Image: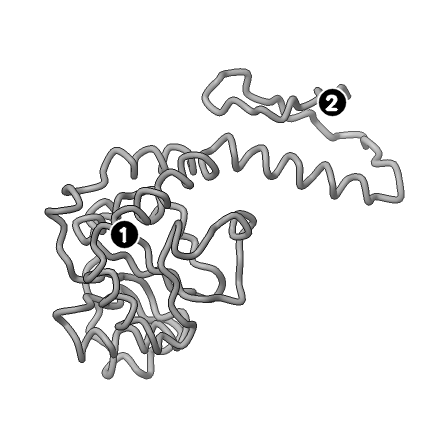
Amino acid sequence: RVSLDMMSVQANTGPSWEEKNTTAFWRGRDSCKERLELVKLSRKYPEIIDAAFTNFFFFKHDESLYGPIVKHISFFDFFKYKYQINIDGTVAAYRLPYLLAGNSVVLKQDSIYYEHFYNELQPWKHYIPFKSDLSDLLEKLQWAKEHDEEAKNIAKSGQEFARNNLMGDHIFCYYFKLFQEYASLQVSEPKIRDGMEKVQQPDDDLFPCTCHRKKVQL
């Protein structure tokens, strides 16, 4: 699913850089207070940021302040916009790999949360960083507008990072190595109990793994 989605994104990246809408874009639900602040900024500076909620759950009592909700749009349509805002939800935003895979530049919120690939991501190379409280987001958007070629190169680097690190085979290999390391910490020998069945692994080449996995025989 991840690989197919990633490949679909790369095949549907919208208009060329020069033809993209220069408004920063975001859609999502009300998973944290910073998202409320983003929508508030959008209301104050609609010519700079287009941010709106597609659902209310955590702050339903504030819907009258930050609503109304808007209709969902295709993720591919995100890439009609040059600047993509990535902001945490309840945890790290799951959409980041897909935003990087497009050909828009990603502005990523500084975060206490992370996914396994964050250590390899470099600010100002793969994305434009902004503070967790959004206090410099407008400043960073202005920088991107004034340094269009540099922002375009950051978008390209982010896309290359996604292609080289976040496709299906990369994710599968990561989990394989993760479970290998986890297994090495076990203090007892796992037992195959009556009633357990071996789960056969696919033998096609859709997600070729370069980990050289060892086959486990039951």
Residue annotated with mark 2: 216
Total residue callouts: 2
Dot 2, crowdedness within 10 Å: few (<14), some or many (≥20)? few
Image position, residue 133 (x, y; %): 40, 77
Mark toward the start of the polypeptide (2 vs 1): 1
Image position, residue 27 (x, y; %): 27, 61
Give amino acid for label 1.
Glu
> Is 106 situated left or right of 117 in this image?
left
Residue that appears at 18% across and 77% down: 43
Q: Secondary structure at mark 2?
A: loop
Image position, residue 216 (x, y; %): 74, 22
Looking at the picture, tell me which residue is in the foreground, 136 or 201. 136
Give amino acid for label 2.
Val
Residue that appears at 14% across and 50% down: 20
Tell me, for residue 214, which label it has, or none.
none
Tell me, for residue 150, which label it has, or none.
1
Image position, residue 115 (x, y; %): 53, 53
Residue that appears at 35% across and 41% down: 159
| Image quarter in which the C terminus is found | top right
Residue that appears at 36% across and 43% down: 157
Q: Secondary structure at mark 1?
A: helix
Looking at the picture, tell me which residue is in the foreground, 37 or 190. 37
